Image (spheres, rainbow, N blue to C red):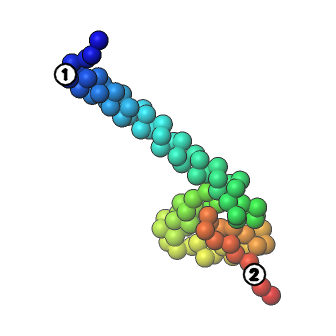
């Protein structure tokens, strides 16, 4: 039995509405960011270096010190050098002190 064009269109509309529901979109966003965080913590080339884990997964750590605390991130990096030695203060940076 062949479905009429109206019935096929109605079925397609139901399928698209179900696929793009808020719960599916929210779930996809959670999975996406969870995958990025997991990669940065365990598989990223800088993952093995010491440093705060929150700083290793996102740039929010740096943004907090620069925007909320008024540019204190440079001082925080100095503090992290004292705590960790060479450190990994963001997903894209590695700091080392050469003496």
Q: Earlier in the sequence, mark 1 or mark 2?
A: 1
Q: Residue furthest toward the bottom?
A: 99
- Disc 2, SS: loop
Residue 94, image quadrant? bottom right
Residue lying at the far front in this picture: please name it: 1
Within 10 angstroms of label 1, few (less than 14), some, or many (20 or more) residues? few
The residue identified by callout 1 is 6
Q: Residue at x 79, y 72 (%)?
A: 85
Q: Is residue 14 visible?
A: yes
Viewer-proximal residue, 7 or 83? 7
x and y percent of residue 77 in the render?
66, 73
Query: Residue at left 19%, top 22%?
Result: 6
Q: Is residue 99 above or below residue 58?
A: below
Residue 48 in percent (x, y) is at 76, 61
Q: Is residue 38 left or right of residue 10?
A: right
Residue at image position (42%, 32%) is 23
Residue closest to the far left: 6
Q: Is residue 54 visible?
A: no
Q: Position of residue 2 (x, y in %)?
A: 27, 16
> Disc 2 designates what residue?
97
Comparing 88 with 75, the one in front is 88
């Amino acid at each position: 039995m062949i479905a009429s064009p109206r019935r096929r269109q109605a079925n397609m509309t139901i399928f698209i509405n179900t696929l793009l529901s808020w719960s599916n979109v929210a779930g996809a966003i959670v999975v996406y960011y969870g995958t990025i965080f997991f990669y940065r913590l365990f598989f990223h080339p800088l993952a093995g270096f010491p440093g705060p884990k929150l700083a290793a997964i996102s740039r929010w750590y740096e943004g907090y010190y620069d925007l909320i605390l008024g540019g204190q991130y440079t001082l925080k990096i100095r503090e992290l050098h004292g705590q960790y030695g060479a450190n990994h203060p963001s997903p894209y940076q590695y700091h080392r002190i050469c003496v």
